[in-house]
Amino acid sequence: MLRSIPMRVAVAATALFAAAVSAPQAVAVDTPSVRVSSEADAATKALVRTDPKAAAEAVAAANVCGSSYSLRSATPLPLGTDPNMRLAMLFAYEGSAGGCAILDNNVGASRYMYVQVCKVGGTACDTDSGNFSQYAGPVYISSFACAPVTAKMGTSSSSLSINYKSSYVFPCG
């Protein structure tokens, strides 16, 4: 019995040390921060500044694209939807290797999702589609200025609640 006391003390000390070391990481998770491109539009900057849920989603999506990417655009979908009612967010990131797009699922259940980004003229497209509970993508494009994007989401590919197409996901010029 006396031998087990030093072992319990050692285990407790190890647990306390581990908690102290991991505590700063817990604080960092509670206050997510995404690197926003200086070229991001005002709506994107305002969204990540004022909407904690969107900011957290942007951080998670950025980690999927890679650590060298900065948020260029965040589009709540369907367009014009109240933030509490949005079904998805289309995130576009830029980095030295090009662009990355992710369609983030806000429904909390698996849905058919489709995201595609192409070079100007609709060539050299990267597409991801399927049933996903978190996100579709990442899809990458090497030349991302004026890159056309398509984002779809629904209960199936023939029953869409989002069918978003834009002539570009990354602003031109």
Image (cartoon, grey):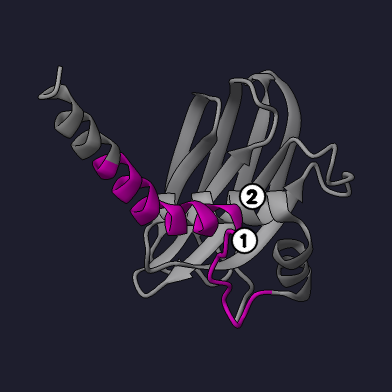
In what element is the residue under mark 1?
loop
Image coordinates of residue 31 in percent, x first then y, are 60, 59
- Kind of residue at disc 1: Val
- State the residue position of label 1: 169
Decide: is 49 above or below 126.
below
- State the residue position of label 2: 90
The residue drawn where x is 51% and y is 50% is 61
Judge whether residue 101 can be spotted in this image: no
CA separation, marks 2 and 1? 9 Å
| 25 is within the stretch colored magenta | yes
- Mark 2 and mark 1 residues within 8 Å of each other at the beta carbon: yes
The residue drawn where x is 69% and y is 40% is 88
Judged by its main secondary structure, the magenta piece is helix
Q: Residue furthest front?
A: 2
Q: Residue furthest left?
A: 3
Residue range of the region highlighted in magenta in the rendering: 13-40
Image coordinates of residue 45 in percent, x first then y, are 71, 71
Q: Nearer the viewer, residue 149 or 138?
A: 138
